[in-house]
Image (cartoon, grey):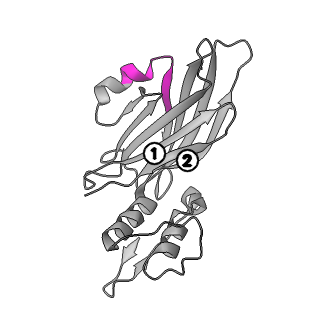
Amino acid sequence: MSCYKDGSIALAYSGEAAKDDDIEKWLDAGTFGKRERLDAPTYANLSEELDALGYAVHAPKVIETDWKDPLGWPHYRAEARIFLPGYDMTTSHLKVLANGNPVGYDSNNAANHKKACSHENYLVTHIDTSEADGAIAALRHYQPKDGDAVQVLFEVRYRPSRDFEKEYVLHFIVSDTKDYESDEQTIPGP
């Protein structure tokens, strides 16, 4: 994103981020938008509109999910790939929970990372930083078959850098009946 002296904004996306339509919703619903989209939000003031722009540009986004029921295994396997815009290993903060439990990666707690990643149920398998505009994180959670739950609720808390005071929060469900369902995406407040 680039801002110019005349107040105009130029947005450029590549790779996985180009598939997201949060920017399109923001452009349509904003001050100069045509308001043609039925799913576009309405903004009460300029501050809300700018918060929504920040969300559209910086919040984590689900790329794909998968639910596996391996034959003979004592657990299900929920997997997801998420895009983290602007991710930097040295300045970004990422924390992931599965059904309220740590998935094994908290970039603010590197000492606990190794211990948590070795736990058999929770695992951030990989963070691919080769994307020019961010990173892709692969998540995996093993859900025991002896319980009632046939779904996993992932919670992703993300701050692209220390310059962001609050986190962007993404909740989504991976289950045997749905490939992907998002129940909330939180825009940080002031």
Q: Which residue is mark 1?
A: 170
Q: Which residues are magenta?
A: 114-125
Mark 1 or mark 2, which has the lower sequence index? 2
Q: Residue at x 40, y 31 (%)?
A: 105
Q: Vertical placement of 81 versus 165: above or below?
A: above
Q: Could you give the CA–CA distance between mark 1 and mark 2, rounded to whole angstroms?
A: 9 Å
Badge 2 amino acid: Val
Q: Is residue 116 magenta?
A: yes
> At 31% from the left edge and 45% from the top edge, which residue is drawn?
90
Q: In the image, what residue type sits under mark 1?
A: Leu
Image spot of residue 37 (x, y percent): 59, 71
Of residues 15 and 43, which is closer to you in this image? 43
Measured as percent of width and height from the top left, residue 134 is found at: 45, 54
| 12 in the magenta segment | no
Q: Residue furthest bottom?
A: 6
Residue 73, x across and y down, in percent: 67, 13
Residue drawn at point x = 39 percent, y = 22 percent: 116
The front one of 37 and 156 is 37
Q: Residues within 10 Å of mark 1 (few under 14, many from 20)?
A: many
Q: Residue 154: x and y, percent?
A: 49, 35
Which residue carries the number 2 mark? 62
Q: Is residue 109 above or below residue 148?
A: below
Badge 2 density bin: few <14, some 14–19, many ≥20, Cα 10 Å: many
Q: Secondary structure at mark 2?
A: strand
Q: Which of the image's four quarters has the C terminus? A: bottom left
Q: Does residue 151 appear left or right of residue 58 in this picture?
A: right
Quadrant housing the N terminus: bottom left
Q: Relative to 61, does residue 38 appear above or below in the rendering? A: below
Find out whether the residues at labels 1 and 2 contact each other: C-beta distance under 8 Å.
yes
What secondary structure is marked by label 1?
Answer: strand
Is 44 on the left or on the right of 12, as rendered? left
Q: Quadrant of residue 8?
A: bottom left
